[in-house]
Image: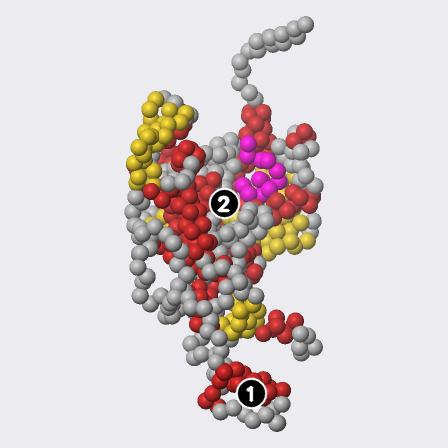
Amino acid sequence: MDSPLPEVPAPRDIRELPDELISQIAAGEVVERPASVVRELVDNALDAGARNVLVKLMAGGVRGIVVEDDGCGIPVAQLPLALKRHATSKIASLNELESVATMGFRGEALAAIASVSEMAIASRTADAAHAHRLDARSGELSAAARSRGTSVEVRELFFATPARRKFLKTDATEAAHCVEAVRRHALARPDVGFAIWHEGKLVDQWRAASSEQRISDVLGADFIAESRPFEFSAGPLALSGRAGLPEASRSRADQQYVWVNGRHVRDKLISHAIRSAYEDVLHGQRQPSYVLFIEIGPELVDVNVHPTKIEVRFRDGRAIHQSVRRAFIDALAQSRSTEAAGVESVMAPLGFEPTTPATLYDAEPRPGYSVYVPPVPPTAAQVRLSLVQHETLWDAGTAPAPAAAALPDIRLPDQDWPLGRAIAQIQGVYILAENKQGLVIVDMHAAHERVVYERLKAKLGATTIESQPLLIPVSFAATAEEVAAAEQHADTLAQLGLDVAPLSARTLAVRSRPALLAATDLVALTRELLAEMAQFDASSVLERAQHEILATMACHGAVRANRQLTLDEMNALLRDMEATERADQCNHGRPTWRQLDMRELDALFLRGR
């Protein structure tokens, strides 16, 4: 039996909504939770030129929020106007909207907050005799006492919409979100002091400081120690911040901060660029930590695309993507050993080159490269010398001391190599080296794999991508979006060695491919490439595919475990690591070396206790 059709509702007349309902609808877009109120009010305080901002919370901000600042204040005649919808002092024309440089500009925050809470504003300008307080609910204006600046008091959030209040979390959770909102402002504005109180107790306080000191105060000294600063500029774009080291990665993406012209944002384009920069050095699904400040001309970014202003749109997304990715790649390129002392390789690299196409490596061995020779058995004289040293160690009083010239010099060389001098090999897997800090342990295969991989990438980057025409083009059914992306980015695809042409409205054909990717699934590669270009206006899919091949070649070409190396070869590997970018991790993101300083070694043996 067929179910009855639903009844058609009776038509309703079109009418204008009352102002209060309009404000409550707007509040649903702007005010999600108490942290949204804190963010909007702190935005206004910074726009007013505040040098100190105080935030007080009650019951996680649900029962009460007070934001006080020492900015320029609001003239008494303009206080009632500040509560009206779309009333603002920050923009006056379309030109100003397209190049807005203030934090808050929509002119709807105060009106939206007042519609779902009990709100009052107290403000005083520099030339006023005293402050004035305006009750948003009754409209009553009265005299008040406070210094120059503005105080906004919000009580009983969502009291007018009880259903919305039921969706809030516990007071502790809401308070944590409010603190995080202030932390984001504090990181972006180190020149401003911030203080947060909850239930009459000081939660956090940050005084005005330098940018690095503010980052240390907010994120901790460990973040400074486990990250690397960077600066990058290109035309009207300037990037700065700190990139977390791969070994300090986290299981959650809870320490990733991005600001555009001082505004905290979440942007997929920027996140994708940063993630692709970490691909070669991050293990598994680990998340990097970073702080990124983007300064760009206001006319080149649209901040009016989301009611909460958490999203932005760039005029040239491809340039932003490439710049952010390059800034992080450069910051991560320097290894910790190279960072400790800028050295260049002066010893011959290991002769464990992989078998690769002639386009990447010359067929003939390059001069200066050592060739591995199996260890030669010790001579009788060397055995006798070892026996003498052994007896001297245990019975210095009875055994004759060997000639001083015959004993090997065990002192560290005059050159202070960051990774030290090789002293032994364990089970054919690890190299032990001694430096001034203590003991260095190196994973032999992982370290050499990174060295070979970086050489392969350098060779590939120095040549153009060679395209190989296909005898029979590979065609596949495509979506309308894929066809549009192939037509829009045809020149970029050609530079990458791919010739992708539409055969019909729903069919694409690949007529040539990069010569290096002969064994790659072309349809899957092209689909992934087009999807990334359509979403981010840029792509690193092809580079990633090429690097995966180079990583496999490097893995097979690197020195294998259980292979005995001479001291000269071990030292050559250490020197190559010091001169190789990203040498702290192998191609899979695992660490290649670890340092144990003397304090850690003493602790293992309980020395000094």
**Residue 165 at x, y percent in the picture:** 67, 33
Task: Name the residue: 56% across, 61% down.
Answer: 221
**Residue 11, label in figure:** none
Q: Which residues are magenta?
A: 29-41
Q: Quadrant of the N terminus?
A: top right
Q: Which element is circle 1 on?
A: helix
Please tell me which of labels 2 and 1 falls first in the chain: 2
Kindly tell me whether residue 429 is visible in this rendering. Answer: yes
Q: Which mark is residue 388?
A: 1
> Which of the colour schemes (rainbow, by chain, secondary structure, one colour) is used?
secondary structure
- The amino acid beneath tag 2 is His
Instruction: Give whichever of 454, 396 is nearer the camera.
Output: 396
Q: Residue 424 location in percent, x, y?
A: 53, 72
User: Relative to the observer, which residue lies in front, 311 or 490?
Assistant: 490
Which of the labelled discs sits on residue 264, or is there none?
2
Residue 151 is situated, as x and y percent measured from the top left of the image, at 58, 45
Name the quarter where the C terminus is drawn: bottom right
Q: Which of these two is toward me, 193 or 279?
A: 279
Residue 481: image location, x then y, percent: 41, 27
Query: What amino acid does circle 1 point to?
Result: Val
Within the image, what quadrant is residue 269 found in?
A: top left
On screen, residue 247 above or below 105: below
Question: At numbered mark 2, what does the secondary structure look like: helix, strand or loop?
Answer: strand
Whether residue 127 is visible: no
**Are discs 2 and 1 less than 8 Å apart at CB?**
no
How would you rate the neighbour count of disc 1 (Cα within 10 Å): few for under 14, some for 14-19, many for 20 or more? Answer: some
Tell me: 174 left or right of 464. right
Q: Quadrant of residue 474?
A: top left
Which one is in front in this view, the residue at disc 2 or the one at disc 1? 1
Which residue: 49% across, 78% down? 378
Residue visible at 50% across and 67% down in the picture: 564
Residue 31 in magenta stretch = yes
